Amino acid sequence: MTSVEDQELTNQKSRQRRAGIAARNAIPAALRRAADRRICAALLAWGEYRAAQTILLYAAAGGEVNLADFAAQAQREDKTLCYPRCLPGHQMDALQPLGPDSWEEGAYYILTPVPARSRRIPPQEVELILVPCAAFDPACRRVGMGGGYYDRYLTLCPNAVTVGVAYDCQKVAQAASGPLDVGLDAFVTELGWYHR
């Protein structure tokens, strides 16, 4: 890509990111809770979830879909749940918190596992990854928050099924996507599924 094309892609991502975040933040609290419950129920009923033992999910921040109901049920089913920790160089690691005191506020004010009180999960052991986004399209391309953490990490996970998690109001006709952006296998919203 030329520098002009790079800049236009960056600008388009920024516009879609702002619009997607504004759309999800505009959802009234009661509707958001109902949407979160529907999304968690859809994930828990999904065959890929049933087959997976080791799952990377996220602690919701900034209006993202809240996966607390999903996490509680997955723990009851003895799934191994790990969460991202941002590392220098826009890298990411997956850590399994080992207790209620295994959390701290990390990069970008996101609740993050404390390394000394967590177990690192190698990327090749992760079987299902739930990915947040700012915007997405029906072809399962996503616009994230701009750091590229997930795009880098997903390339290290050869055995993982990847599913984006969003509200349907974050959908765009075509997500701004460049050569380093990793498409996902599926997306789930409160209205249903999108598959690549």
Image: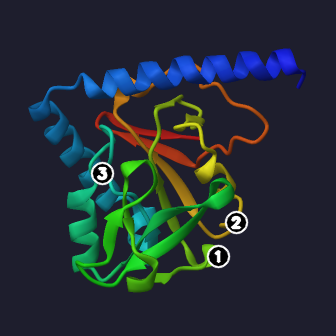
Which quarter of the rendering shows the C terminus? top right
- Residue at the disc numbered 1: 124
Q: Tell which circle, 1 or 2, labels the residue nearer the N-terminal end.
A: 1
Left or right: where does residue 2 sit relative to residue 106? right
* Residue occupying the far right of the picture: 2
Mark toward the viewer: 3 or 1 = 1
Q: Quadrant of residue 180?
A: top right
Q: Is residue 7 above or below residue 134?
A: above
Specify the quadrant of the image occupied by residue 155: bottom right
- Cα–Cα span, label 2 and label 3: 26 Å
Amino acid carrying label 1: it is: Gln
**Camera-side residue: 140 or 25?**
25
For discs 2 and 3, the disc positioned in front in the rendered view: 2
Are discs 3 and 1 less than 8 Å apart at CB? Answer: no
List x then y, in percent, for residue 120.
Answer: 52, 81
Look at mark 2 in the image and give the residue it sits on: 156
- Residue at point 79%, 23% (across, down): 6
Contact? badges 1 and 2 (CB < 8 Å): yes
Q: Dot 1 surroundings within 10 Å: few (below 14), some, or many (20 or more)?
A: few
Q: Position of residue 119 (x, y in %)?
A: 46, 84
Q: Residues within 10 Å of mark 2 (few under 14, many from 20)?
A: some
Secondary structure of the residue carrying numbered label 1:
helix
Instruction: Give the residue number, with chain letter if any, for mark 3.
Output: 42
Q: Earlier in the sequence, mark 3 or mark 1?
A: 3
How far apart are labels 1 and 2 at the CA level?
Answer: 7 Å
